[in-house]
Structure formats: C-alpha cells, structure tokens
Image (cartoon, rainbow, N blue to C red):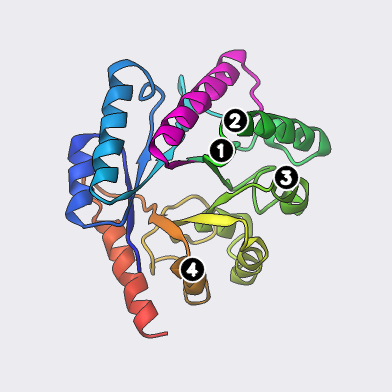
Amino acid sequence: MKIGLKCSYDPEQLYNRLRYRPDIIELHLNEDDLFGDKRKQLENTISMLSSQGYDVYLHHPSIYNGRYLNIIHEQKEDYLFYHLSTRIIADICLSNSIKCVIHPHYMQNATSAINKANNDKMVKEIKQILSYGKDVFLWENSIEGIFTAQNPNWFEDIVQPLNLPLAYDISHAFISFRGNNRLLLEQIEKLDSFIEYFHVVDSEGLKHDGLKLGTGRIDWKPILPFLMSRQYIYEITLKDITDAIEMYESHLYLVHLSKHS
C-alpha cells in the first residue's frame, strides 16, 4: 500500500510529512502561492521533492478573497483569477511533469445547481481550462451540485464527453449518496477507467467531516482493489495541521485491512 500525504509547502508541515516516508505528496496551494517569491519557493519545493523520488501533485487554490472558487463565476474578479491561476499551474505542471487536482466548484449555489444551462456552461469552461494543459488537471467531485455524485447525469453529460481524468474524493461521493455504500461502490466501478487519483477519507455520510479511516461508515474492504492500482492521498482533518498522525493512522488501517481481507 502506498502512502500519500497532504500539506502546504510550508516547511514545518512539509518536513513533518516527510518523516512518515510517503510515496506521494499533495501540495495544497493558497491564492498567493503562484506569484513572485512564493512561486519560486513552490517550484523549488517541487524540484526538491521530485529529485528525491516523491510523486508530487498540486491542489488548485480553493478560495480567492475569502470566497470559494467556482468555474462558473458570478464575479468577474473570481473568473479572471480562476483562469490566470490555472494557466500558471499548467505551466508549472508541464515544466515539472506533475499534475494538479482541481474543483469545478465547491459550494452549492445557483451556478452549480443541477440543470442543463449550468451543464452547458461548465462544459464550455472546462474545455477552456483543458486548452491550457489537457493532461495536467485531475477533476475532483464535490458534495452537492452539478459536478458531484448527486447529479445523476454527471458522468454522461460532463465526464465522459470531455474524457476527464478524475480525482475521486470517496467521502464527498459517500455524502452525496447520503451514506449509501452500495451506491458508492457502484459509482467507483462505473467510473473506474476515468479515476486516476483518489482522496481517501472516511465520513459518517451526513456532512463534510474528514474522518480518520475506520471511524466513519464507509466500507473500505470492497474499495481496496481500486486503491491498490491508483495514486491517492489521505485527506483527513487533522487536530494539528503540522502533524499528519491521523493520515498515517489511516494508512495503517488500510494496511491492516489489506492483510486480513
């Protein structure tokens, strides 16, 4: 079993993660990490990690000016940042032969409601992002709205026509399915050839809770074979952001499960 951990590129967080000898590091970016000296620090960090044999992934900034980003933006300033940031990230990823996880949207609002108009807008916007770097971005499902397991036509209307590689967040889908393990497994099976990367995290299935594996209601045993053939990171809510112990304990849970399944 591989171990994948998440952090910012803040040295205190990063060196803590490296203590656990991970195979994969996902660096979550903030809105100002792509400019000036911070961009240089980011690129130096990517080079350092890659040269030492770690598989590096980026995660597109989730918030701009205190607002969650959405590919279909109501405010022009957010729209411009979404496109500028993805162009910069595409350049960084292409230069370093790495990939970036990206959300088409986070929160449920009018622009992410499930309807044909939003579907058509989203397809158009994703096509634009793909033009910056077709194979760079891994598209992550949210909990509510058009780019989620909640949308019955998510696969047929968006993922399949655009041939999108997915970063499949298992807990997000589980919550979309209101805690239904059967529906979760059926969708993983359906999306199998499109899922390139997993976010592995447990949940009670009611809200975004970011639980350590084994403390929620997700049935991990049938999901194990899919994880064994993919890259993934543990995205657990930490008591202390500078210590990944809950992520590591989640890894030990999967290792134990794999040995006794």
Q: CA distance from mark 3 to mark 2?
A: 16 Å
Q: Residue at left 73%, top 31%? A: 124
Q: Position of residue 39 (x, y in %)?
A: 33, 23
The amino acid type, in three-letter code, at marker 3 is Ile
Q: Which residue is mark 2?
A: 70
Q: Residues at badges 4 and 2 in contact (C-beta under 8 Å)?
A: no
Counting residues from the start of the chain, the first of labels 3 and 4 encountered is 3
Q: Position of residue 30 (x, y in %)?
A: 38, 28
Please state the extent of the stretch shown in magenta in the rendering. Answer: 72-100
In the displayed structure image, the side of residue 52 where residue 63 appears, left or right = right
Q: Which residue is mark 3?
A: 158
Discs 4/1, front: 1
Mark 3, other Cα within 10 Å: few <14 / some 14–19 / many ≥20: some
In the displayed structure image, the side of residue 50 where residue 177 appears, left or right = right
Q: CA distance from mark 4 to mark 2?
A: 29 Å
Q: Residues at badges 2 and 1 in contact (C-beta under 8 Å)?
A: yes
- SS at mark 4 in the image: loop
Counting residues from the start of the chain, the first of labels 1 and 3 encountered is 1
